[in-house]
Image: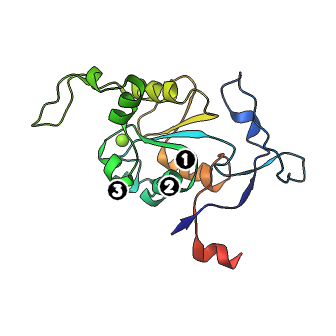
């Protein structure tokens, strides 16, 4: 089982949100770091939309020479945090990580999946599958109040407004360095040693 870290100091993170019209929400009744910055329980007070590509991003199909995001982590954030975790690349990740994907995002936004057009039963492909950028914009519309939008993809998506793009290997590094407002899960056995 994977468990969330307890408290995390968000000192460096408050200014990093790209949507300038949003104020960082300081939670009530929680301790602060030495600097007076709020300490945030991962997932309790900050909602991040995490959009995951699959191939060369998650370890079910890692880049041959680069670090990938463990599938366990994706599942953890979905199951144990309030972050919104979605599959925006290869939709095999929907089943593998037990997270919603592009079809579900359109279904929720539009009420049905007519915008996709016909599905080719042989290839499983829809007539009007949206471009990657559009898939992110659909999520943004679904969660307009999110604090941050992060996409992890081996394709460069840093041109997409309001989204922070990471390659999996950079994402994992940022996670280890505490540069993100999310934390990697800690195995229970490790926590008990703390
Ligand atoms: Mg990929």
Query: Are discs 3 and 2 less than 8 Å apart at CB?
Result: no
**Which residue sits at x=59%, y=40%?**
48
Q: Which mark is residue 171?
A: 1
Q: Residue at x 76, y 36 (%)?
A: 25
For the question of whether residue 28 can be seen, the reply is: yes
Q: Residue 52: horizontal and vertical position, in percent?
A: 44, 42
Q: Residue at x 84, y 50 (%)?
A: 29
The type of colouring in the image is rainbow
Separation (CA) of disc 3 from disc 2: 19 Å
In this view, the residue in front, 38 or 62, is: 38
Helix or strand or loop: what does disc 3 sit on? helix
Instruction: Identify the element where label 2 is drawn.
Output: helix
Tag of residue 138: none
Do residues under tags 2 and 1 come within 8 Å of each other at their CB atoms? Answer: no
- Residue 167, percent from left and from top: 49, 42
Residue 32 is left or right of residue 79, and the answer is: right
Left or right of 36? Residue 159 is: left
The residue under label 2 is: 79
Quadrant of the rendered image containing residue 106: top left
Callout 1 crowding tier (Cα within 10 Å): few <14, some 14–19, many ≥20: many
Q: Residues within 10 Å of mark 2 (few under 14, many from 20)?
A: some
Give the SS element for disc 1: helix
Label 2 to label 1: alpha-carbon separation: 20 Å
The quarter of the picture where residue 149 lies is top right
- Residue 64 vs 90, above or below: the answer is below
The image shows residue 33 at horizontal and vertical percentages of 85, 53
Asked whether residue 64 appears in the rendered view, the answer is: no
Ligand 1, seen in the image, is in the quarter at top left
Q: Nearer the viewer, residue 141 or 167?
A: 141
What residue is pinned by disc 3?
A: 60
Dot 2 or dot 1, earlier in sequence: 2
Q: Nearer the viewer, residue 63 or 23?
A: 23
């Amino acid at each position: 089982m994977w468990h969330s870290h307890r408290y995390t100091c968000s000192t460096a993170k408050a200014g990093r949100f790209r949507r300038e019209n949003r104020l960082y929400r300081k939670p009530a009744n929680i301790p602060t770091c030495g600097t007076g910055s709020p300490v945030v329980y991962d997932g309790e007070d900050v909602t991040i939309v995490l959009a995951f590509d699959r191939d060369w991003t998650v370890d079910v199909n890692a880049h041959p020479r680069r670090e990938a995001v463990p599938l366990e982590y994706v599942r953890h954030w979905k199951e144990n945090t309030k972050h919104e975790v979605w599959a925006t690349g290869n939709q095999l990740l929907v089943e593998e990580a037990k997270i919603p994907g592009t079809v579900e995002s359109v279904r929720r936004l539009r009420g049905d999946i007519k915008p996709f057009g016909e599905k080719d039963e042989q290839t499983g492909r829809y007539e009007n599958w949206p471009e990657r950028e559009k898939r992110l914009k659909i999520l943004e519309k679904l969660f307009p109040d999110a604090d941050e939008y992060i996409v992890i993809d081996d394709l460069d998506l840093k041109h997409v407004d309001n989204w922070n793009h990471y390659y999996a290997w950079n994402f994992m590094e940022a996670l280890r360095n505490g540069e993100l407002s999310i934390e990697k899960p800690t195995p229970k056995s490790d926590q008990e040693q703390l």
